[in-house]
Structures are given as C-alpha cells and as structure tokens.
Image (cartoon, rainbow, N blue to C red):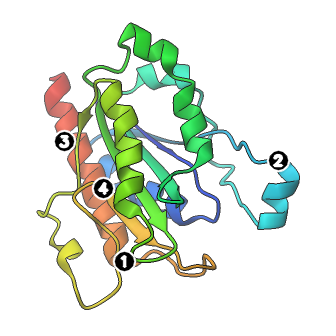
C-alpha cells in the first residue's frame, strides 16, 4: 500500500482543514495516510497572543521520517508571498536527506491558504515546490480535470500548482466546499500517481 504524508503548518486552521481533505482523498484512493505538523518556531507567548491553534491530534514530524513515505504533500499558509518560516525552517533541516538523495523519486504536491484572492497563493506554492524539486521529487499539481477551480461565480482557491483556500484578512473565512473538493481531488491524484511509480 502506498504511504503518503500530508505535512503542514497552520496558524488558524485553514491549512489544517485542507490537510484533512487531502488525506481523505488519498485514503479513498487506497493510500495509507499520515497527517503531520512541522514544529512551531514562534515563541509560545507570541503564538498565544496571536491566537495560533495547533491540532494536537496530528504529530510533529521530524525530517528523518520523510524517507518512510512514497509521497509527501506539503501545505503552508502564505507569509508575504512565500511559505511560512516554520515550514521553511523544516526544509532547511533536510540537507542530510538531500546529500543522500533520500527523497529522489518520491511524489510531491503543495497546498496553501492566503488572506485574499491575490495574496500570493501561486508564489507560495512555487516556494514549497522548489524544495521538493531540489530533492528530486516528482511533482503533481491540481490539474483542470478538477473543473471546480474554473468557477468564476464565487471567490475560491485552487490553481494548477496545488490546492488552496482564502482565509480572509482576519482569518474568519472558512474553506469553500469547492476548495475542499479540490484538496480531495489532489490527494487522490497523488495517491494514484505514487502507486503507479512504486509498482
């Protein structure tokens, strides 16, 4: 059975919600899925004052465990048009894996959230995917087989680079059902792709 890690950082729960939807899609496609978080790097008093909430049901993942998976789907909120410092710090610690080529040939994908419609979803996904490409991973995007991302009637996320959602400036906007459907689609596609590559 294909083993997939959905690895994310979330401050207010939006990326967490996408992670769960991605995991659901991958599981429905027959994969064994683990959802895990990267370590929080903000000082505890800052995290508390800012209202950060970590989903304690998801374990904190350390870089060495990445080798256990056939696919890694990485999610981070946008910070000034790029991945969060927490996620960047995690990938900065993977140099030893890179030196050994430990992730070469694994499947990778990305997901994100932004405050606004044009808040940097695609640039954030590029900054996630560049890490995966440098590790020699095979990238899967959110293709237009998921037609929901072509909807122009509502404010929604989604791009060819991965699943996404829009959180609102104050974080009050919840992921749209279309965004969650796109996340499930991406999870299933990664699971099917990984299964073919490891067969």
Q: In this view, does 140 lie above or below 180?
A: above
Which of the two discs, 2 and 4, labels the residue nearer the N terminus? 2
Q: Mark 1 points at which residue?
A: 177
Most distant residue in the right direction: 45
2 and 3 marks in contact (CB < 8 Å): no
Distance in Å between CA atoms under marks 3 and 1 = 23 Å
Q: Is mark 2 on a helix, strand or loop?
A: loop
Image point (25%, 41%), residue name = 191
Q: Name the residue under label 4.
A: 162
Q: In this view, does 48 lie to the left or right of 130?
A: right
Determine the image quadrant of residue 140.
top left
Image point (38%, 14%), residue name = 102
Image point (28%, 24%), residue name = 136
Q: Name the residue under label 3.
A: 192
Q: Mark 2 points at which residue?
A: 43
| Other residues around mark 2 within 10 Å, as few (<14) / some (14–19) / many (≥20) | few
Q: What element carries label 3?
A: helix
Quadrant where the image shows the N terminus: top left
Distance in Å between CA atoms under marks 1 and 4 = 16 Å
Between marks 1 and 4 in the image, the one whose residue lies nearer the viewer: 4
| Other residues around mark 4 within 10 Å, as few (<14) / some (14–19) / many (≥20) | many
Q: Which of the labelled discs sits on residue 80, or is there none?
A: none
Q: What element carries label 1?
A: helix
Which percent across, then down, holds residue 16?
53, 58
């Amino acid at each position: 059975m294909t083993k997939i890690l959905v690895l994310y950082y979330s401050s207010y729960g939006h990326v967490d919600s996408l992670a769960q939807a991605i995991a659901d899609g991958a599981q429905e496609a027959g994969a064994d899925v683990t959802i895990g978080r990267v370590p929080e790097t903000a000082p505890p008093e800052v995290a508390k004052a800012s209202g950060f909430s970590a989903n304690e049901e998801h374990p904190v993942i350390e870089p060495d465990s990445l080798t256990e998976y056939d696919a890694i789907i990485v999610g981070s909120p946008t910070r000034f048009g790029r991945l969060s410092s927490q996620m960047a710090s995690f990938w900065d610690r993977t140099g030893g894996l890179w030196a050994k080529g430990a992730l070469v040939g694994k499947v990778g994908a990305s997901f994100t959230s932004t405050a606004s419609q044009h808040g940097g979803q695609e640039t954030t996904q590029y900054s996630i995917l560049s890490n995966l490409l440098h590790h020699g991973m095979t990238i899967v995007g959110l293709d237009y087989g998921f037609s929901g991302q072509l909807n122009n009637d509502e404010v929604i996320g989604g791009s060819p680079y991965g699943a996404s959602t829009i959180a609102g400036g104050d974080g009050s906007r919840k992921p749209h059902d279309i965004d969650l459907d796109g996340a499930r689609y991406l999870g299933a596609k990664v699971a099917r792709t990984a299964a073919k590559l490891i067969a």
